[in-house]
Protein backbone atom coordinates (compact mmCIF):
# COMPACT_ATOMS: atom_id res chain seq x y z
CA UNK A 1 0.00 0.00 0.00
CA UNK A 2 1.52 3.30 -1.08
CA UNK A 3 0.45 5.96 1.42
CA UNK A 4 0.97 9.71 1.19
CA UNK A 5 0.46 12.10 4.11
CA UNK A 6 -0.17 15.77 3.27
CA UNK A 7 1.11 18.18 5.94
CA UNK A 8 3.80 17.23 8.44
CA UNK A 9 2.74 19.08 11.59
CA UNK A 10 1.99 17.28 14.83
CA UNK A 11 -0.65 15.08 13.27
CA UNK A 12 0.83 14.48 9.83
CA UNK A 13 4.35 13.67 10.95
CA UNK A 14 3.22 11.36 13.76
CA UNK A 15 0.71 9.66 11.43
CA UNK A 16 3.37 9.20 8.74
CA UNK A 17 5.93 7.79 11.15
CA UNK A 18 3.40 5.47 12.82
CA UNK A 19 1.99 4.12 9.55
CA UNK A 20 5.55 3.46 8.32
CA UNK A 21 6.34 1.75 11.60
CA UNK A 22 3.52 -0.77 11.17
CA UNK A 23 4.91 -1.64 7.75
CA UNK A 24 3.42 0.73 5.17
CA UNK A 25 5.32 2.62 2.51
CA UNK A 26 4.78 6.29 3.45
CA UNK A 27 5.70 9.57 1.75
CA UNK A 28 5.10 12.74 3.74
CA UNK A 29 4.49 15.91 1.72
CA UNK A 30 4.84 19.46 3.01
CA UNK A 31 4.94 22.82 1.26
CA UNK A 32 7.50 24.09 3.78
CA UNK A 33 10.87 23.40 2.12
CA UNK A 34 12.92 24.06 5.24
CA UNK A 35 10.83 21.58 7.26
CA UNK A 36 11.19 18.92 4.58
CA UNK A 37 14.95 19.43 4.35
CA UNK A 38 15.28 18.94 8.11
CA UNK A 39 13.08 15.85 8.10
CA UNK A 40 15.15 14.31 5.29
CA UNK A 41 18.04 14.47 7.77
CA UNK A 42 16.00 12.78 10.48
CA UNK A 43 15.34 16.03 12.36
CA UNK A 44 11.80 16.60 13.60
CA UNK A 45 10.40 20.09 13.01
CA UNK A 46 8.29 19.71 16.15
CA UNK A 47 9.34 18.95 19.71
CA UNK A 48 7.65 15.65 20.43
CA UNK A 49 9.32 13.20 22.84
CA UNK A 50 10.51 10.01 21.14
CA UNK A 51 9.71 10.95 17.56
CA UNK A 52 13.21 11.21 16.06
CA UNK A 53 14.36 7.62 16.77
CA UNK A 54 11.10 6.44 15.12
CA UNK A 55 11.73 8.71 12.12
CA UNK A 56 15.30 7.48 11.68
CA UNK A 57 14.42 3.79 12.10
CA UNK A 58 11.73 3.92 9.41
CA UNK A 59 13.75 6.11 7.05
CA UNK A 60 16.63 3.63 7.27
CA UNK A 61 14.20 0.78 6.55
CA UNK A 62 13.12 2.63 3.37
CA UNK A 63 9.51 2.90 4.52
CA UNK A 64 9.41 6.66 5.24
CA UNK A 65 10.17 9.48 2.81
CA UNK A 66 9.80 13.26 2.82
CA UNK A 67 9.21 15.52 -0.17
CA UNK A 68 7.89 18.87 -1.31
CA UNK A 69 6.95 17.29 -4.66
CA UNK A 70 3.29 16.68 -3.86
CA UNK A 71 2.23 16.16 -7.48
CA UNK A 72 4.53 13.19 -7.98
CA UNK A 73 3.64 11.66 -4.61
CA UNK A 74 -0.13 11.98 -5.26
CA UNK A 75 0.21 10.32 -8.69
CA UNK A 76 1.73 7.21 -7.13
CA UNK A 77 -0.52 7.05 -4.06
CA UNK A 78 -3.17 4.45 -3.23
CA UNK A 79 -4.31 6.33 -0.14
CA UNK A 80 -3.71 10.00 0.74
CA UNK A 81 -4.09 11.28 4.31
CA UNK A 82 -4.76 15.00 4.68
CA UNK A 83 -3.35 16.45 7.91
CA UNK A 84 -3.02 20.15 7.12
CA UNK A 85 -3.98 22.81 9.66
CA UNK A 86 -7.57 24.03 10.07
CA UNK A 87 -6.95 27.07 12.29
CA UNK A 88 -9.53 29.48 13.61
CA UNK A 89 -10.53 32.31 11.27
CA UNK A 90 -11.59 35.74 12.52
CA UNK A 91 -15.24 34.60 12.96
CA UNK A 92 -14.24 31.66 15.18
CA UNK A 93 -15.01 29.19 12.39
CA UNK A 94 -12.49 26.66 11.01
CA UNK A 95 -10.37 28.16 8.23
CA UNK A 96 -10.41 25.60 5.43
CA UNK A 97 -7.96 27.39 3.11
CA UNK A 98 -5.13 24.86 3.54
CA UNK A 99 -7.51 21.92 3.27
CA UNK A 100 -9.08 23.20 0.06
CA UNK A 101 -5.64 23.88 -1.40
CA UNK A 102 -4.63 20.30 -0.60
CA UNK A 103 -7.80 19.06 -2.33
CA UNK A 104 -6.94 21.13 -5.42
CA UNK A 105 -3.31 19.92 -5.39
CA UNK A 106 -4.44 16.29 -5.21
CA UNK A 107 -7.15 16.70 -7.88
CA UNK A 108 -4.66 18.30 -10.27
CA UNK A 109 -2.15 15.48 -9.88
CA UNK A 110 -3.95 12.13 -9.58
CA UNK A 111 -4.15 9.86 -12.60
CA UNK A 112 -5.69 6.78 -10.94
CA UNK A 113 -8.42 6.01 -8.39
CA UNK A 114 -7.45 6.92 -4.87
CA UNK A 115 -8.85 7.10 -1.33
CA UNK A 116 -8.46 10.43 0.47
CA UNK A 117 -8.53 10.19 4.26
CA UNK A 118 -9.23 13.39 6.23
CA UNK A 119 -7.30 13.50 9.52
CA UNK A 120 -7.60 17.28 9.91
CA UNK A 121 -10.41 18.40 12.22
CA UNK A 122 -13.12 19.74 9.91
CA UNK A 123 -16.69 21.05 10.35
CA UNK A 124 -19.54 18.67 9.70
CA UNK A 125 -20.20 18.47 5.97
CA UNK A 126 -16.61 19.28 4.91
CA UNK A 127 -15.78 15.76 3.70
CA UNK A 128 -18.86 15.80 1.48
CA UNK A 129 -17.80 19.19 0.13
CA UNK A 130 -14.35 17.71 -0.58
CA UNK A 131 -16.01 14.83 -2.43
CA UNK A 132 -17.96 17.33 -4.50
CA UNK A 133 -14.77 19.27 -5.30
CA UNK A 134 -12.97 16.08 -6.35
CA UNK A 135 -15.86 15.09 -8.64
CA UNK A 136 -15.70 18.51 -10.27
CA UNK A 137 -11.91 18.92 -10.45
CA UNK A 138 -10.89 15.32 -11.22
CA UNK A 139 -13.83 13.68 -13.04
CA UNK A 140 -11.47 11.24 -14.82
CA UNK A 141 -10.77 9.24 -11.62
CA UNK A 142 -12.78 7.92 -8.68
CA UNK A 143 -11.80 9.56 -5.41
CA UNK A 144 -13.45 8.22 -2.25
CA UNK A 145 -13.29 10.41 0.85
CA UNK A 146 -13.02 8.90 4.35
CA UNK A 147 -13.15 10.81 7.64
CA UNK A 148 -10.59 9.55 10.17
CA UNK A 149 -10.35 12.16 12.93
CA UNK A 150 -7.25 12.21 15.10
CA UNK A 151 -7.27 12.05 18.91
CA UNK A 152 -3.58 12.24 19.78
CA UNK A 153 -2.32 14.68 22.40
CA UNK A 154 0.80 16.75 21.96
CA UNK A 155 3.60 15.64 24.22
CA UNK A 156 2.41 12.02 24.20
CA UNK A 157 1.56 11.76 20.51
CA UNK A 158 3.56 8.59 19.77
CA UNK A 159 2.15 6.78 22.78
CA UNK A 160 -1.39 7.90 21.96
CA UNK A 161 -1.08 6.71 18.35
CA UNK A 162 -0.04 3.21 19.37
CA UNK A 163 -2.34 3.01 22.41
CA UNK A 164 -5.41 5.03 21.41
CA UNK A 165 -8.85 4.11 22.74
CA UNK A 166 -10.45 3.96 19.30
CA UNK A 167 -9.91 4.63 15.62
CA UNK A 168 -12.93 6.31 14.05
CA UNK A 169 -13.57 5.62 10.38
CA UNK A 170 -16.41 7.56 8.79
CA UNK A 171 -17.26 6.53 5.23
CA UNK A 172 -20.10 6.29 2.74
CA UNK A 173 -18.30 3.68 0.70
CA UNK A 174 -17.84 0.26 2.35
CA UNK A 175 -14.84 -0.70 0.26
CA UNK A 176 -12.97 2.51 1.13
CA UNK A 177 -13.82 2.03 4.81
CA UNK A 178 -12.47 -1.54 4.66
CA UNK A 179 -9.21 -0.40 3.03
CA UNK A 180 -8.63 2.24 5.71
CA UNK A 181 -9.53 -0.23 8.48
CA UNK A 182 -7.00 -2.72 7.05
CA UNK A 183 -4.30 -0.04 7.04
CA UNK A 184 -4.87 0.65 10.75
CA UNK A 185 -5.48 -2.97 11.88
CA UNK A 186 -1.82 -3.59 12.99
CA UNK A 187 -2.23 -0.93 15.71
CA UNK A 188 -4.57 -3.38 17.47
CA UNK A 189 -6.88 -0.53 18.53
CA UNK A 190 -10.69 -0.93 18.37
CA UNK A 191 -12.06 0.45 15.09
CA UNK A 192 -15.38 2.27 15.14
CA UNK A 193 -17.12 2.48 11.77
CA UNK A 194 -19.66 5.21 11.21
CA UNK A 195 -20.99 7.59 8.59
CA UNK A 196 -18.93 10.61 7.57
CA UNK A 197 -20.93 13.31 9.34
CA UNK A 198 -20.98 11.40 12.62
CA UNK A 199 -17.20 10.90 12.43
CA UNK A 200 -16.72 14.63 11.92
CA UNK A 201 -19.00 15.34 14.90
CA UNK A 202 -17.30 12.73 17.14
CA UNK A 203 -14.10 14.78 16.94
CA UNK A 204 -15.71 18.12 17.88
CA UNK A 205 -17.96 16.56 20.52
CA UNK A 206 -15.01 14.74 22.14
CA UNK A 207 -12.90 17.88 22.40
CA UNK A 208 -15.87 19.94 23.60
CA UNK A 209 -16.68 17.35 26.26
CA UNK A 210 -13.10 17.24 27.55
CA UNK A 211 -13.01 21.06 27.62
CA UNK A 212 -16.29 20.96 29.55
CA UNK A 213 -14.76 18.65 32.16
CA UNK A 214 -11.87 21.11 32.58
CA UNK A 215 -14.07 24.21 32.91
CA UNK A 216 -16.37 22.30 35.28
CA UNK A 217 -13.56 21.28 37.62
CA UNK A 218 -12.11 24.80 37.45
CA UNK A 219 -15.43 26.26 38.57
CA UNK A 220 -15.60 23.72 41.40
CA UNK A 221 -12.02 24.73 42.31
CA UNK A 222 -13.00 28.39 42.45
CA UNK A 223 -15.87 27.51 44.79
CA UNK A 224 -13.58 25.24 46.88
CA UNK A 225 -11.36 28.25 47.56
CA UNK A 226 -14.31 30.14 49.00
CA UNK A 227 -15.84 27.32 51.06
CA UNK A 228 -12.55 25.89 52.36
CA UNK A 229 -12.63 22.56 50.49
CA UNK A 230 -9.62 21.13 48.64
CA UNK A 231 -9.98 20.56 44.88
CA UNK A 232 -7.36 17.79 44.77
CA UNK A 233 -9.38 15.79 47.30
CA UNK A 234 -12.64 16.64 45.58
CA UNK A 235 -11.38 15.62 42.11
CA UNK A 236 -9.90 12.39 43.49
CA UNK A 237 -13.16 11.53 45.22
CA UNK A 238 -15.23 12.36 42.14
CA UNK A 239 -12.89 10.48 39.81
CA UNK A 240 -13.32 7.23 41.76
CA UNK A 241 -16.84 7.06 40.34
CA UNK A 242 -16.33 5.12 37.10
CA UNK A 243 -19.21 7.04 35.54
CA UNK A 244 -17.24 10.27 35.99
CA UNK A 245 -13.68 9.00 35.52
CA UNK A 246 -10.57 10.61 36.95
CA UNK A 247 -9.05 12.05 33.78
CA UNK A 248 -9.36 15.70 32.75
CA UNK A 249 -10.27 16.74 36.28
CA UNK A 250 -7.02 18.60 36.93
CA UNK A 251 -7.92 22.10 38.02
CA UNK A 252 -5.63 24.87 36.85
CA UNK A 253 -5.48 28.03 34.79
CA UNK A 254 -7.59 26.59 32.02
CA UNK A 255 -7.03 24.81 28.75
CA UNK A 256 -4.92 26.12 25.88
CA UNK A 257 -3.28 24.55 22.86
CA UNK A 258 -3.99 24.22 19.19
CA UNK A 259 -7.22 22.28 19.59
CA UNK A 260 -9.57 22.89 22.54
CA UNK A 261 -9.81 26.68 22.15
CA UNK A 262 -10.37 26.59 18.38
CA UNK A 263 -12.53 23.46 18.28
CA UNK A 264 -14.89 24.63 21.05
CA UNK A 265 -15.34 27.95 19.27
CA UNK A 266 -15.83 26.21 15.91
CA UNK A 267 -18.49 23.88 17.35
CA UNK A 268 -20.32 26.80 18.94
CA UNK A 269 -20.22 28.47 15.53
CA UNK A 270 -21.38 25.33 13.70
CA UNK A 271 -24.34 25.20 16.09
CA UNK A 272 -25.09 28.93 15.73
CA UNK A 273 -25.14 28.55 11.95
CA UNK A 274 -28.09 26.19 12.28
CA UNK A 275 -29.76 28.47 14.85
CA UNK A 276 -28.82 26.33 17.82
CA UNK A 277 -27.39 28.35 20.67
CA UNK A 278 -24.99 26.01 22.42
CA UNK A 279 -25.25 27.74 25.81
CA UNK A 280 -23.32 25.08 27.72
CA UNK A 281 -20.33 25.27 25.38
CA UNK A 282 -20.39 29.06 25.36
CA UNK A 283 -20.17 28.97 29.18
CA UNK A 284 -17.26 26.50 28.98
CA UNK A 285 -15.37 28.95 26.77
CA UNK A 286 -16.22 31.94 28.96
CA UNK A 287 -15.13 30.11 32.14
CA UNK A 288 -11.84 29.22 30.46
CA UNK A 289 -11.17 32.79 29.38
CA UNK A 290 -11.66 33.94 32.97
CA UNK A 291 -9.61 31.08 34.39
CA UNK A 292 -6.55 32.03 32.32
CA UNK A 293 -6.51 35.32 34.25
CA UNK A 294 -6.84 33.69 37.66
CA UNK A 295 -3.24 34.17 38.77
CA UNK A 296 -3.31 37.86 37.82
CA UNK A 297 -6.43 38.26 39.95
CA UNK A 298 -4.76 36.52 42.89
CA UNK A 299 -1.59 38.58 42.50
CA UNK A 300 -3.57 41.83 42.41
CA UNK A 301 -5.42 40.78 45.52
CA UNK A 302 -2.14 40.04 47.26
CA UNK A 303 -0.09 43.06 46.11
CA UNK A 304 -2.68 45.68 45.27
CA UNK A 305 -0.66 47.10 42.38
CA UNK A 306 1.72 45.03 40.25
CA UNK A 307 3.60 48.02 38.84
CA UNK A 308 7.34 47.66 39.43
CA UNK A 309 7.05 44.06 40.65
CA UNK A 310 9.47 41.53 39.17
CA UNK A 311 7.51 38.41 38.27
CA UNK A 312 9.10 35.09 37.26
CA UNK A 313 6.95 33.20 34.75
CA UNK A 314 7.69 29.50 34.99
CA UNK A 315 6.47 27.54 31.96
CA UNK A 316 5.35 29.11 28.69
CA UNK A 317 4.05 26.25 26.49
CA UNK A 318 0.35 25.35 26.79
CA UNK A 319 1.23 22.08 28.51
CA UNK A 320 4.42 20.17 29.40
CA UNK A 321 6.44 18.10 26.89
CA UNK A 322 5.70 20.36 23.95
CA UNK A 323 7.09 23.63 22.64
CA UNK A 324 3.68 24.57 21.21
CA UNK A 325 2.70 28.09 22.21
CA UNK A 326 -0.70 28.15 20.49
CA UNK A 327 -3.31 29.61 22.89
CA UNK A 328 -0.96 29.13 25.86
CA UNK A 329 -2.04 30.82 29.10
CA UNK A 330 1.40 32.48 29.17
CA UNK A 331 0.32 34.72 26.28
CA UNK A 332 -2.52 36.15 28.35
CA UNK A 333 -0.60 36.31 31.63
CA UNK A 334 2.53 37.97 30.14
CA UNK A 335 0.44 40.57 28.33
CA UNK A 336 -1.59 41.42 31.45
CA UNK A 337 1.47 41.64 33.71
CA UNK A 338 3.16 44.01 31.27
CA UNK A 339 -0.02 46.08 31.03
CA UNK A 340 0.13 46.38 34.84
CA UNK A 341 3.74 47.58 34.41
CA UNK A 342 5.34 44.58 36.05
CA UNK A 343 8.71 43.23 34.89
CA UNK A 344 8.36 39.75 33.41
CA UNK A 345 11.24 37.25 33.53
CA UNK A 346 10.31 34.02 31.80
CA UNK A 347 11.74 30.52 31.75
CA UNK A 348 10.61 27.36 29.97
CA UNK A 349 12.74 24.21 29.55
CA UNK A 350 11.82 23.81 25.85
CA UNK A 351 9.49 26.52 24.50
CA UNK A 352 11.55 29.71 24.88
CA UNK A 353 12.66 29.75 21.23
CA UNK A 354 9.07 29.66 19.99
CA UNK A 355 7.84 31.87 22.84
CA UNK A 356 10.18 34.68 21.84
CA UNK A 357 8.30 34.96 18.52
CA UNK A 358 4.86 35.33 20.09
CA UNK A 359 5.28 36.91 23.55
CA UNK A 360 5.60 40.70 23.85
CA UNK A 361 9.15 41.92 23.22
CA UNK A 362 9.42 43.35 26.76
CA UNK A 363 9.58 39.83 28.24
CA UNK A 364 13.06 38.96 29.57
CA UNK A 365 14.23 35.35 29.19
CA UNK A 366 16.26 33.46 31.77
CA UNK A 367 18.53 30.51 30.93
CA UNK A 368 17.66 28.59 34.07
CA UNK A 369 14.81 28.50 36.54
CA UNK A 370 17.09 29.78 39.31
CA UNK A 371 17.99 32.78 37.18
CA UNK A 372 14.31 33.58 36.56
CA UNK A 373 13.64 33.50 40.30
CA UNK A 374 16.60 35.72 41.19
CA UNK A 375 15.34 38.83 43.06
CA UNK A 376 11.73 38.14 41.97
CA UNK A 377 8.85 39.54 44.00
CA UNK A 378 6.59 36.70 42.83
CA UNK A 379 6.68 33.51 40.77
CA UNK A 380 3.82 32.32 38.59
CA UNK A 381 3.78 28.67 37.51
CA UNK A 382 1.90 28.30 34.23
CA UNK A 383 3.05 24.89 32.97
CA UNK A 384 3.61 21.82 35.15
CA UNK A 385 6.97 20.78 33.69
CA UNK A 386 8.70 18.05 35.77
CA UNK A 387 11.59 20.48 36.25
CA UNK A 388 9.28 22.70 38.34
CA UNK A 389 7.48 19.85 40.11
CA UNK A 390 10.81 18.42 41.19
CA UNK A 391 12.40 21.74 42.09
CA UNK A 392 13.65 21.91 45.67
CA UNK A 393 11.35 24.44 47.34
CA UNK A 394 14.34 26.00 49.10
CA UNK A 395 15.31 27.46 45.69
CA UNK A 396 12.31 29.81 45.89
CA UNK A 397 13.31 30.81 49.41
CA UNK A 398 16.97 31.37 48.55
CA UNK A 399 16.60 33.11 45.21
CA UNK A 400 13.51 35.27 45.42
CA UNK A 401 13.26 38.69 47.00
CA UNK A 402 10.00 37.50 48.56
CA UNK A 403 9.10 33.80 48.07
CA UNK A 404 5.52 34.33 46.94
CA UNK A 405 4.33 31.66 44.53
CA UNK A 406 1.15 31.69 42.43
CA UNK A 407 0.86 28.13 41.18
CA UNK A 408 -1.57 27.75 38.27
CA UNK A 409 -0.98 23.99 38.01
CA UNK A 410 -0.97 22.80 41.63
CA UNK A 411 2.57 21.44 41.30
CA UNK A 412 3.28 21.02 45.00
CA UNK A 413 1.62 19.23 47.90
CA UNK A 414 0.44 21.73 50.52
CA UNK A 415 2.15 19.81 53.34
CA UNK A 416 5.51 20.13 51.50
CA UNK A 417 5.11 23.86 50.94
CA UNK A 418 4.07 24.34 54.57
CA UNK A 419 7.58 23.33 55.71
CA UNK A 420 9.11 26.44 54.08
CA UNK A 421 8.82 30.18 54.73
CA UNK A 422 6.81 30.60 51.54
CA UNK A 423 3.57 32.28 50.58
CA UNK A 424 1.75 29.94 48.24
CA UNK A 425 -1.45 30.49 46.29
CA UNK A 426 -2.68 27.61 44.14
CA UNK A 427 -5.96 26.67 42.46
CA UNK A 428 -8.87 25.39 44.54
CA UNK A 429 -6.78 24.92 47.68
CA UNK A 430 -6.13 26.86 50.88
CA UNK A 431 -3.39 29.46 50.61
CA UNK A 432 -0.26 29.00 52.70
CA UNK A 433 1.15 32.16 54.22
CA UNK A 434 4.33 31.18 56.02
CA UNK A 435 6.49 34.23 55.40
CA UNK A 436 7.48 35.64 58.72
N1 LIG B 1 -1.97 19.22 17.07
C1 LIG B 1 -2.70 18.27 17.57
O1 LIG B 1 -2.43 17.78 18.65
C2 LIG B 1 -3.91 17.75 16.83
C3 LIG B 1 -4.55 16.58 17.30
C4 LIG B 1 -5.68 16.11 16.61
C5 LIG B 1 -6.16 16.77 15.50
N2 LIG B 1 -5.51 17.89 15.06
C6 LIG B 1 -5.99 18.52 13.83
O2 LIG B 1 -5.11 18.07 12.79
C7 LIG B 1 -4.89 19.13 11.84
C8 LIG B 1 -3.41 19.43 11.74
O3 LIG B 1 -2.97 19.96 12.96
P1 LIG B 1 -1.42 20.16 13.29
O4 LIG B 1 -1.34 20.70 14.65
O5 LIG B 1 -0.69 18.91 12.95
O6 LIG B 1 -1.06 21.30 12.20
P2 LIG B 1 0.29 22.08 11.92
O7 LIG B 1 -0.08 23.47 11.67
O8 LIG B 1 1.29 21.73 12.99
O9 LIG B 1 0.83 21.43 10.56
C9 LIG B 1 0.20 21.54 9.31
C10 LIG B 1 1.25 21.33 8.21
O10 LIG B 1 0.59 21.31 6.94
C11 LIG B 1 1.46 21.94 5.99
N3 LIG B 1 0.63 22.31 4.81
C12 LIG B 1 -0.30 23.28 4.70
N4 LIG B 1 -0.85 23.27 3.47
C13 LIG B 1 -0.26 22.26 2.77
C14 LIG B 1 -0.42 21.74 1.46
N5 LIG B 1 -1.28 22.23 0.58
N6 LIG B 1 0.38 20.70 1.09
C15 LIG B 1 1.29 20.17 1.95
N7 LIG B 1 1.45 20.63 3.21
C16 LIG B 1 0.70 21.65 3.63
C17 LIG B 1 2.06 23.10 6.76
O11 LIG B 1 3.23 23.56 6.14
C18 LIG B 1 2.32 22.43 8.12
O12 LIG B 1 3.61 21.86 8.20
C19 LIG B 1 -5.77 20.28 12.32
O13 LIG B 1 -7.01 20.18 11.68
C20 LIG B 1 -5.92 20.02 13.79
O14 LIG B 1 -7.11 20.57 14.31
C21 LIG B 1 -4.40 18.39 15.69
O1 LIG C 1 -7.29 17.82 33.53
C1 LIG C 1 -6.83 18.60 32.68
C2 LIG C 1 -6.39 18.19 31.40
C3 LIG C 1 -5.90 19.15 30.52
N1 LIG C 1 -5.84 20.45 30.87
C4 LIG C 1 -5.35 21.46 29.90
O2 LIG C 1 -6.02 21.25 28.66
C5 LIG C 1 -5.18 21.60 27.57
C6 LIG C 1 -5.13 20.48 26.55
O3 LIG C 1 -4.46 19.38 27.10
P1 LIG C 1 -4.40 17.95 26.36
O4 LIG C 1 -5.77 17.52 26.04
O5 LIG C 1 -3.59 17.06 27.20
O6 LIG C 1 -3.53 18.32 25.07
P2 LIG C 1 -3.82 18.49 23.50
O7 LIG C 1 -2.56 18.08 22.82
O8 LIG C 1 -4.38 19.84 23.24
O9 LIG C 1 -4.92 17.36 23.12
C7 LIG C 1 -6.31 17.63 22.98
O10 LIG C 1 -6.57 18.16 21.69
C8 LIG C 1 -6.16 17.29 20.61
C9 LIG C 1 -6.42 18.04 19.31
O11 LIG C 1 -7.73 17.94 18.88
C10 LIG C 1 -6.94 15.97 20.69
O12 LIG C 1 -6.53 15.12 19.63
C11 LIG C 1 -6.68 15.32 22.04
O13 LIG C 1 -7.47 14.13 22.15
C12 LIG C 1 -7.07 16.31 23.14
O14 LIG C 1 -6.77 15.74 24.43
C13 LIG C 1 -3.81 21.95 28.18
O15 LIG C 1 -3.69 23.35 28.28
C14 LIG C 1 -3.87 21.34 29.58
O16 LIG C 1 -3.08 22.05 30.51
C15 LIG C 1 -6.27 20.87 32.12
O17 LIG C 1 -6.24 22.06 32.45
N2 LIG C 1 -6.76 19.93 33.00
Image (spheres, rainbow, N blue to C red):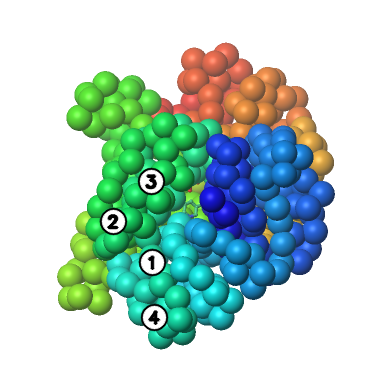
Of the image marks 3 and 2, the number of the one nearer the N terminus: 2
Q: How far is the residue under mark 2 from the one under mark 1?
A: 10 Å
Residue picked out by circle 1: 144
Instruction: Determine crowd level at label 4: few under 14, some 14-19, many 20+ residues with C-alpha closer than 10 A.
Output: some
Residue picked out by circle 3: 181
Q: How many marks?
A: 4
Q: Which image quadrant is residue 224 in?
A: top left
Label 2: element kind: helix
Q: Which numbered dot is residue 135?
A: 4
Residue, x 36% and y 57% (percent of image)? 176
Front residue of 377/371: it is 371
Residue, x 58% and y 39% (percent of image)? 23
Q: Judge whether residue 338 can be spotted in this image.
A: no
Where residue 118 sits: x, y (%)?
A: 44, 61
Q: Is mark 4 within 8 Å of ligand 1?
A: no
Of the image marks 2 and 4, the number of the one nearer the N terminus: 4
Q: How far is the residue under mark 2 from the one under mark 4?
A: 19 Å
Horizontal side of residue 49 vs 246, given as left or right: right
Instruction: Determine crowd level at label 3: few under 14, some 14-19, many 20+ residues with C-alpha closer than 10 A.
Output: some
Amino acid sequence: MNIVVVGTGYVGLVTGVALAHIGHQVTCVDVDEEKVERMKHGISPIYEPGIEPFMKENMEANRLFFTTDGARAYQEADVIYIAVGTPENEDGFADLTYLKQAVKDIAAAVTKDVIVVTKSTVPIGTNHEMKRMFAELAPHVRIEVVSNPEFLREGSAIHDTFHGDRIVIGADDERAAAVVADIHRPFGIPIFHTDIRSAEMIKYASNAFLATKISFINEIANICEKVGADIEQVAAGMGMDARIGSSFLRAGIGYGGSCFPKDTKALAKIAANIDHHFELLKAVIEVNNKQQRKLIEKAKERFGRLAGKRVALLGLSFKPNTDDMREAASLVVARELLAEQATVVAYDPIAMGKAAHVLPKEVIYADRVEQALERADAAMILTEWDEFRQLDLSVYVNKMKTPIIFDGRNCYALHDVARYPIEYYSIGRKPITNIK
